[in-house]
């Protein structure tokens, strides 16, 4: 009887993906990519050194989140973390504390262009972190105070950086133009994510 030798050229098993985010938008984007993943959540402080600017802030926060999950990763797991920030000039607009702050943020954004950065960190249990970010420029038309107050009261965007979501009402009535990825504004630059996951052997068709 002849025994066949094991196929040494077989592709290694892909890592199991862990999404460290409570964002329903990020979950939907990964699902729409056809990826299988587990959601894992924990509290991570979202502070950053004051000298950081723009993309560096988003990348720092994404990497900080990933490090919080590193000790608990199984050998075959890869964690995905992300952080989205809105920048008006060099001011970082985080999630508003209340409705009054949300109204104030949107008053600052109305009639102007601003930048959205999403930083992403991919951390395999047995490898080094891969950190990257993407930028999208968003143009808002001028908004009236009643329009802003209507949005804040009915859509309560207190969980969103910059106090708005491009995928909901204000995105439809206020965003006049995007330069860059729409999905990046939603919270995940999926084109870059797929590219970097493929380099790590985590996805493919």
Image (spheres, grey):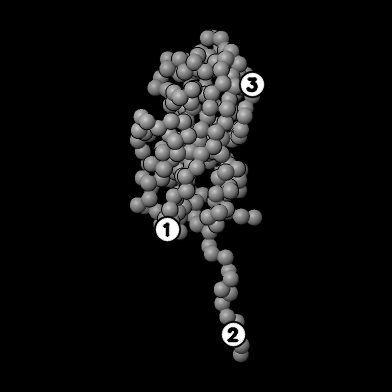
Quarter of the picture containing the C terminus is: bottom right
- Disc 3 element: strand
106 left or right of 173 in image: left
Dot placed on the residue nearer the N-terminal end, 1 or 2: 2
Q: Is residue 190 above or below residue 17?
A: above
For marks 2 and 3, give the one nearer the viewer: 3
Mark 3 lies on residue: 176
42 left or right of 10 in image: left
Residue drawn at point x = 57 percent, y = 43 percent: 192
Q: Position of residue 202 (x, y in %)?
A: 54, 55
- Disc 2 element: loop
Q: Which mark is on residue 126?
A: 1
Dot placed on the residue nearer the N-terminal end, 2 or 3: 2
Residue drawn at point x = 53 percent, y = 14 percent: 148
Mark 2: few/some/many CA within 10 Å (<14, 14-19, 20+) = few
Mark 2 lies on residue: 3
Q: Quadrant of residue 32?
A: top right
């Amino acid at each position: 009887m002849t025994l066949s030798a094991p196929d040494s050229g077989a592709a290694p098993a892909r890592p199991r993906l862990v999404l460290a985010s409570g964002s329903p938008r990020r979950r939907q984007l990964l699902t729409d990519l056809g990826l299988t993943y587990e959601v894992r959540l924990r509290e991570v402080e979202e502070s950053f050194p004051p000298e950081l600017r723009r993309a560096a802030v988003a990348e720092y926060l994404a990497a900080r989140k990933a490090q919080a999950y590193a000790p608990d990763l199984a050998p075959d797991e890869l964690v995905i973390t992300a952080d989205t920030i809105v920048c008006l000039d060099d001011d970082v607009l985080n999630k508003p504390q209340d409705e009054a702050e949300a109204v104030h943020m949107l008053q600052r954004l109305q009639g102007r262009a601003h930048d959205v950065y999403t930083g992403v960190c991919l951390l395999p249990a047995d490898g080094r972190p891969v950190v990257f970010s993407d930028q999208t420029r968003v143009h808002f038309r001028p908004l009236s105070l009643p329009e802003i107050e209507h949005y804040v009261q009915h859509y309560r965007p207190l969980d969103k950086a910059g106090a708005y979501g491009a995928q909901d009402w204000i995105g439809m009535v206020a965003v006049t133009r995007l330069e860059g990825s729409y999905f990046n504004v939603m919270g995940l630059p999926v084109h870059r994510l797929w590219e970097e996951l493929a380099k790590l052997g985590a996805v493919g068709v």
